[in-house]
Each structure stands twice: as C-alpha cells, then as structure tokens.
Image (tube, coloured by chain):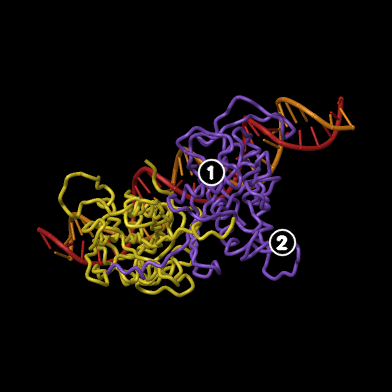
Chain colours: A yellow, B purple, C red, D orange
Amino acid sequence: MPYDPSAFPPFAVTVDLVVLTVRQHALCALAVRRGEPPFQGRWALPGGFVRGDEDLATAAARELAEETGLLAHDPAAPAVANAAHLEQLATYGDPKRDPRMRVVSVAHLALAPDLPAPRPGGDARSVRWAPVEDLLDQEVGYGREDEQAAPLAFDHARILADGVERARSKIEYSSLATAFCPQEFTVGELRRVYEAVWGVALDPRNFHRKVTGTPGFLVPTGGTTTRQGGRPAQLFRAGGATLLNPPMLRPEA
Amino acid sequence: MPYDPSAFPPFAVTVDLVVLTVRQHALCALAVRRGEPPFQGRWALPGGFVRGDEDLATAAARELAEETGLLAHDPAAPAVANAAHLEQLATYGDPKRDPRMRVVSVAHLALAPDLPAPRPGGDARSVRWAPVEDLLDQEVGYGREDEQAAPLAFDHARILADGVERARSKIEYSSLATAFCPQEFTVGELRRVYEAVWGVALDPRNFHRKVTGTPGFLVPTGGTTTRQGGRPAQLFRAGGATLLNPPMLRPEA
DNA sequence: CTGTTTATCGTCAGGCAGACGACTATGATC
DNA sequence: GATCATAGTCGTCTGCCTGACGATAAACAG
C-alpha cells in the first residue's frame, strides 16, 4: 500500500463518559445540558475532545475530574476518598453520529459512590444525576415538552445503555459493586447497590452469607453503624479480590 | 466551550484485527509481515485505516474479508459458510504508539473456524497463522535472529493478549466456542476447541453431559461422523442460545 | 479376534444457592 | 419501661450442578 495521504482521512476523537452512581435506591447517570448546537438544550453524556498529546485513559480521567471532581482510581495506589472506578467501554464511530464532522468517540464507564455533594460540575452548564430508567425510556417524538424528558443527544442513549449493561454484568463476577459504596459500608448497603443496579430484590440472609463467605471480597473494619436504623451493622472495606469466584448470581426472569 | 478549531487535533483512525482460530490443538492468530517502515519486516496484526464514510464495524469487516476471505457473521442472517464472529475489542490511543503520527486504533476480535484453505491473503504480503503462545512469548532483545520470533510491531502484543483473554473468558458464558467449529461438528471437536483456547484438558464425559444438557447450545443434525477415529460421533449445529447459563467452568490453577 | 481409540451413559459425593425459620440489637412509640 | 418496627446475623434443609471416575459402545488397525 503506497503512502497516500488521502488514505488517512482526519478524524476528531472524543471521550464520552457514562458516570453511574446509586442514589435513593436508583441507578443514576450523570447528564449535562448542551449549550450549543447541535442538540442545543438537550441532555447528553459528559465528554470532550482528546488532546493532541493525551492518552485515552488520561483524557477520560481529566473529563471525569472536570465534571465531578472525582479522581480515577489507581489500582496501584491505596484507596482514596473521592475515587471512582474508570474503564474503557466501547468506541462509537458511525459516520453520521455527529452532523458537524467525522467524530469517533471512545466511551468510558465510571462508577462512583453517591457524592455527599450532589453538585457536580466545573463550569456553569447545568448538570444532573438522572435515573438511567428516565434517560433511556424517552422515545423520540413522544410529544412531551418537558425538557427533562427529551432523549439524549447524538447516540448517547445507546452508549448509556451499553454502559449500564456493562455495569450490570460486571458486578456479577467482580467486586466492582463496592465502587458504588463509600470507603466503609455495611452488607446491607452493598446489597442495596446490587438491588438498584439489577432492579431486583435479593434475600438479605443469602446475600449476607454469600458476600461474607467469599474470601477477599470484604474485610471488616471493626466498627459498626446504625445509620440505616435497626440493629447495628458491621462496617467493611473492599478487600483485595477483584474477581468473584463463584460469581454473584443475578436472579433470572 | 467556544468553537476553537485548535481544540480538535486531527487523528488517524485504524482498525486492527485479532483473528483467532484453532489449528492442530493450538490457538492461533493471523499475523502479517510489514512491508514498510516502521517495524519493516516485523510481524503485526492485520488492519488498516478507516475510510472517511465508513463505520468502524464496516471497516473491520472489510479488512477481515481482504485478509482472509471471511465474511463477518450477521446474526440476523442464517448461518453461512466462511462466516466468522466479529466484535469490537478495545481502542488503543497512546500518543506514541505509532512513531509517524497520532493514530487511534479500534481493535476488533474475529473468531473463525480452521480454514480448509490456510492460505489467507489478498495482496502479496506474507501472512501466516501463528500460535498465540509463540507470538506473545517473544521478549524484546532476546537475541534470536529468527525473523519469525521477533515481537509484534507497535502495541500489537498487548492487543493480541487482550483479544485472547476476551476469547478465553467469553467462551465461558457464551456459545462463542462454536464460532471456531465448522457448521457441523461433534462434541469432541467442540471440546478440543475449549482445550486449545484454555490450554487445559477437560474430562470428555463431564463435558459431554454439560454441553448436551444446556438447552439451545447444540442441536443434533442427525448425521454422524467418524473423522476423528473411534466410535462414530453425533453431529451438531450451533443452537440459538448465545448465553450459557450456568456457564462452562474453566478449571482453575 | 484383540487391542486402541473415541463416544456415550451412569453413579456418587461434595459444594453452593434458594427458601425460609429464628434470634439479636438498636430506635421509635405508647 | 414495655412494645413494636426495623435491620442484621446465624442456621437448616433441599435440590441442582460439578468433578471424579467406572462401564459400555462402536468404529479401525493389526
């Protein structure tokens, strides 16, 4: 193949972020309001252009910090407050996905605990946590003028759906559900994470047996808390294990 | 954010392919010899630039057809001979991964049955199936002048390793192992696929019970074959099921 | 006919998950 | 303070699945 410059069409490369958290028993995603065309006024996933000298993971971590103040969790470093799990999700490159130009977006998935300051954002654009159900259930042309209810801009509904599905399946066989919890948490709080992400009810007794019986999943800190009411519960931190074997089983049907 | 053209550094976007098959009890990947710098003469994964009006999946399917003659399997269409499974793997965008310019590569994973014509290739470059073990075990600067033994160009060793790991884990919980088999195959042939991909020995009796007992995994065609020697074996086609529940268990340790 | 190879069916014990009963320790309410 | 509601924790039992492995079946090679 000769060195033909016309064989290298220029692309813009962006990172888009699916940032998930669990708030009030619901799986929520971060959405930002677009301030300029196209899709002006519509909600979209946070994201931005990759800089010329920047790695993809670096760009995703930078965008995450800009939008939420969260740091990407470095597996080599000890646990840090305000750290989120960040991983690459998939890449979307339909030629018509952005009407302005040819854009390839490398989507990333971030999982964060419910922020004590639900006020994310660096700049002044409006930002909100929205239940993923609300963001995904909006059909095009449904006729509602409610600006909260328009479907996501670009192909972001598809990206969000892929990210949610990734999170749902990944908490089955990994300890990633702890990324939704604060540094110290109870078995019940972890169970509510699974229930919110999967949208099911789990038996508290079997769940307790399973997670406390899986080596390396949870390590007790010694403390207890009663913040949920009822009998005080033991506090745990995430253990070193990343893969759960055997996995957590998602109830079928 | 104002519309600043300098905020959109131009990227070249490529697709690279991890094409896997099982040959003679070994998991093999397709490698092509580079005919030009950089890494001239070294082996690399097949791939090429995404065209200006082309989707990523389309570009990957085109490259696959150019290199191997395989068609990407369309889940909506009935099974076709010479069809391979094709899925997006991950995207690699380190600023220094290509010394010539800023290139983002969207890697794809293809799984194909052992081709009756092991002579892949459209153009005249040399192409070969190599055991993944050979391609990955080559350390830099090992001193061997054997040109078959140099490490892969660019970051392709990393991409190949990621693709192999994806294949290894995905045959656990999906019926994808059948993508390595011809349209009709025996339980023993399917077992040898698992053994080659995982690099382990499996108990033929337990394997037979498991795969024939999973609804939708295999459907008997009625025929039998004796091509493996020994007692004639039933022939099967891949059933409609894509997800195996419960999954195949990869022996640990 | 005997040995070899591969396929297929069966048996058995151990482990794990779902269903669910029982008890514990707190705060809220009367 | 007794009672209740709430949430957490420990046990038991049963059924299913898996791993280990014996046994039989159907081909081919000598």
In the structure shown, which secondary structural element does the residue marked by tag 2 occupy?
Answer: helix
Residue at the spot of label 1:
B85
In the structure shown, which secondary structural element does the residue marked by tag 1 occupy?
Answer: strand
In the rendered image, is residue A24 in sight?
A: no
Query: Is residue A69 depicted above or below D27 in this figure?
Result: below
Query: Is residue B77 depicted above or below A105 in this figure?
Result: above
In the rendered image, is residue A187 in sight?
A: yes
What amino acid is at disc 2? Ala
Pointer 2 chain: B
Left or right of B86 on screen, residue A236: left
**Which of B20 and A182 lies nearest the eye of the viewer?**
B20
What amino acid is at disc 1? His
Asked which quadrant contains residue D1, the reply is bottom left
Q: Is disc 2 in contact with disc 1, using a CB cutoff of under 8 Å?
A: no
Pointer 1 chain: B
**Which of D22 and B133 lies nearest the eye of the viewer?**
B133
Left or right of A247 on screen, residue B23: right
Where does the image place residue B139, in percent across and percent down from the top left?
A: 67, 67
Disc marking residue B149: 2
- Give the CA distance from mark 2 to mark 1: 28 Å
Whichever of labels 2 and 1 marks the residue nearer the N terminus, that label is 1
Image quarter in which the N terminus of chain A is found: bottom right
